[in-house]
Image (cartoon, rainbow, N blue to C red):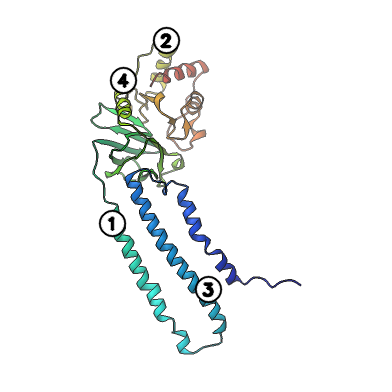
Amino acid sequence: MSSSPEPSEARLVRWLPLGPLILALGACGEGVLDPSGHEASRVAGIWWLMFTLGAAIYVVVLVLLAIALRRGRREQSSDSRSSRFAGTPLVVGGGLVLPVLVMALLTSVTAMSTGRADAGATTVEIEARQYWWRVSYPGAGGVVTANEIHIPVGEPVELVLTSTDVIHSLWVPELAGKIDLVPGRTNRMTIEADEAGEYRGRCAEFCGLAHAHMELLVIAEPPEDFARWLDNEARDSVEPTSDGELAGREVFLGSCSYCHTVRGTNATSDFGPDLTHLASRRTIAAGLLPNTVGDLAGWILDPQRHKPGNAMPAMQLEPDALQDLLTYLETLE
């Protein structure tokens, strides 16, 4: 004997409780609920408040829905004016008054919790471009790098944020919330890392074809290590010594200097990333590829295959010229 199909209302009530769980799992994947800095802890606290209130309201709604479904069948034949308007106070209270109170509470808490923290001694200027990040340290001897931010552990760092083309958005989930980088406007935010480590950030605002491949790496290190890194970054490139390095520099100046800078040479264009200390970076192509010789060779020869839409042209180099170029680039530490 076959059983009757489960009513659609019962199936709905059975699956609805999974909503908050799915929401929580989605947030966990981005590191929002695993903060490693003061600003990120504020964001996580607001998230948990919103989740708790939302879950409580969700449970109440489910209970009321179950009651309404059960009573609805029994009162289907009733058409009296009193039954039709019996739930009016509940609708007004639950559909108007309660949402206003909850939104007022969340707005107040958010406004009080997201005030900008005091900036520390370190200031980092970040300029978003399609599709990479230009990073500079004003007052530190002209330090300019790309797609990586080094910061001292336990110290607030002020980020000064601009854009040269379209609206971008910087988001490092474990250290801070999102903030837009708008052409013609300067925004500021403060980040601070509680412990040493690498924290991945990204552009969180669709900015074009290669938007998904526009990442940023924040490297938090002890203050003494940060000072050594900053001192090394302020130096010009090392003078080549071997024949291969000298030949590679000539290839660079004849092919790459139209877009890139290497301090200590005649290459001074800022259209593309500054490569003065390229070999010391963890990644290339704005976090897309590890900084290895093989990946660097593939990127030079065919950047569009890895990152369609980026502005770098493919280099038509003979094997010997490519090898000399790679030899030279490896010296830029």
From the image, state whether disc 4 or disc 1 is nearer to you.
1
Q: Mark 4 points at which residue?
A: 236
Left or right side of 152 for 331: right
The residues tagged by marks 4 and 2 sit, at their Cα atoms, a distance apart of 18 Å
| Residue that label 3 marks | 66
Residue at image position (38%, 13%) is: 240
Tell me which residue sits at (67%, 71%) in the image.
5
Mark 1 residue type: Ala
Q: Which of marks 3 and 1 is nearer the N terminus?
A: 3
Q: Which of marks 4 and 3 is in front?
A: 3
Mark 4 to mark 1 CA distance (whole Å): 45 Å
Say above or below: 44 vs 193: below
The picture quadrant where one finds residue 37 is top left
Residue 241 occupies which quadrant of the picture? top left
Q: Nearer the viewer, residue 180 or 100?
A: 100
For the residue pair 112 and 137, the one nearer the viewer reads as 112
Does residue 12 sit above or below 90 in this rendering? above
Give the distance between the C-alpha atoms of the residues marked 2 and 3, in whole angstroms: 79 Å
Q: Which of 36 and 65 is in front in this view?
A: 36
Nearest to N terminus: mark 1 or mark 2: 1
- Looking at the picture, which amino acid does disc 3 mark? Ala
Q: Position of residue 278 (x, y in %)?
A: 39, 25
Q: Mark 2, mark 3: which one is toward the viewer? A: 3
Q: Given this view, does label 3 or label 1 mark the residue nearer the observer?
A: 3
Q: Name the residue under label 2.
A: 242
Which residue is identified by label 1? 111
Q: Is mark 2 on a helix, strand or loop?
A: loop
- Distance in Å between CA atoms under marks 3 and 1: 36 Å
Q: Mark 1 falls on what kind of element?
A: helix
Q: Earlier in the sequence, mark 2 or mark 3?
A: 3
Q: In which quarter of the image is the N terminus?
A: bottom right
